[in-house]
Amino acid sequence: MSFLQLLWFILIGVLFAGFFFLDGFDYGVGMATVTLSSDEAERDQMVQTIGPVWDGNEVWLITAGGAMFASFPYWYASLFSGYYIILMLVLVGLIIRGVSFEFRAKSPMPRKRIWDLALGIGSFMAPFFLGIMFISMIQGMPIDANGNFHATFFDYINWFSVVGGVALTLLTYLHGLNYLALKTAGDIRQRANNVAQFLYWVLYVGLVVFALMLIFMTDFMKVHPVATITMLVVMVVLTIIAQAAAIKGKELTAFIASGLTLVALVVLLFVGLFPRVLISSISSRYDLLIQNASSTQYTLTVMTIATCCLLPFILAYTIWAYWIFRKRIAMPVVTEAK
């Protein structure tokens, strides 16, 4: 395995981590428009918190897919062909979300409520099916020597993958609640904080179930026992920090901690996969490895140079966008006409 092969494996992990940190709260806010709001004014307030940034956040997922295509074409080919139905459902969720933002702004009541519901459904679908994909991937799939999937329904949908989908959805929902507490003023701010404090107790149970399944239903403890235990502990510690911060009203700390919990989950998955990119349940001989799934050294070199040139501008723009839209969103004040 060369340095550039390892570098691009890490960079793809970083892109997925950035995607879940940034787009994770988008999904959480989208689900909260259905579960947390009491009227249309509150839903408008919630949507305004993510209105300027939601589409830019999704670029991280597109970039991760593009980077995988360019740096690990065999990984990309096997993953996208083997998971095309699940990825199609993720795409449907993303399309529903994107359409709902546009149509809800132009639709009168009661049709506007339909697009609010569509926003919530799309925001649920994306993290849930991404969770199913990643968890079934680390369990191992029936992949042959040519990298082709021979999977059945229950290879994709099983107890562990469903738990993973629910856990990821819950993590993004909590991340969204912390973002709402950070970015809104009024009743929504307090309500989001109260619901988050309660749901952290549910998350603890979910983390225990997830950890036990990960230990007994994957080979992570056999391949990387220290790293696996370390990252599971980190996730629990970050969850405790986030809950404590929510209780104390330290909204920025709670938001950062919930985001870092998602980052820790991505690190756990990529560390457990290493040095593989896909695990075969048929035989370890058919595992797709970093060293034989990557592009040529020349391609990786060109991509690395281009990334180094473009990355500072992308980071600067992202930081600038969040700085510009850093203020809280308050409910409009309605005064009586004189």
Image (spheres, rainbow, N blue to C red):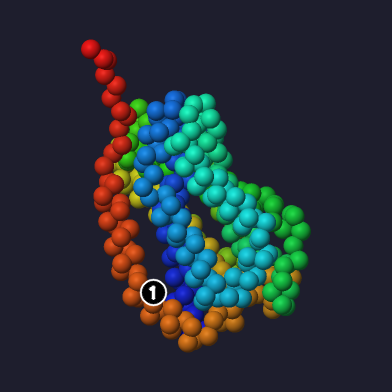
Q: Nearer the viewer, residue 170 or 238?
A: 170
- The quadrant in which residue 86 appears is bottom right
Q: Nearer the viewer, residue 224 or 166?
A: 166
Q: Residue 19 placed where, x, y %?
A: 45, 57
Residue 289 vertical placement versus 321 (above, below): below
Q: Residue at x 51, y 68 (%)?
A: 66
User: Taking the image as drawn, is residue 336 in sight?
Assistant: yes
Decide if residue 42 is on the left or right side of residue 64.
left
Q: Residue at x 35, y 69 (%)?
A: 311
Q: Quadrant of the C terminus?
A: top left
Categorize mark 1 by other alpha carbons within 10 Å: few (<14), some (14-19), many (20+). Answer: few
Decide if residue 188 is on the left or right side of residue 88.
left
Q: Residue 54 placed where, x, y %?
A: 42, 49
Disc 1 is placed on an element classified as helix
Q: Residue 55 placed where, x, y %?
A: 43, 52
Q: Nearer the viewer, residue 11 or 54?
A: 54
Residue 18 vertical placement versus 4 (above, below): above
In the picture of the structure, the residue carrying the numbered disc 1 is 307
Q: Residue at x 67, y 50 (%)?
A: 159
Q: Residue 104 placed where, x, y %?
A: 48, 36
Q: Amino acid at mark 1?
A: Thr
- The quadrant in which residue 332 appears is top left
- The residue sitting at the top extreme is 338
User: Taking the image as drawn, is residue 17 in sight?
Assistant: no
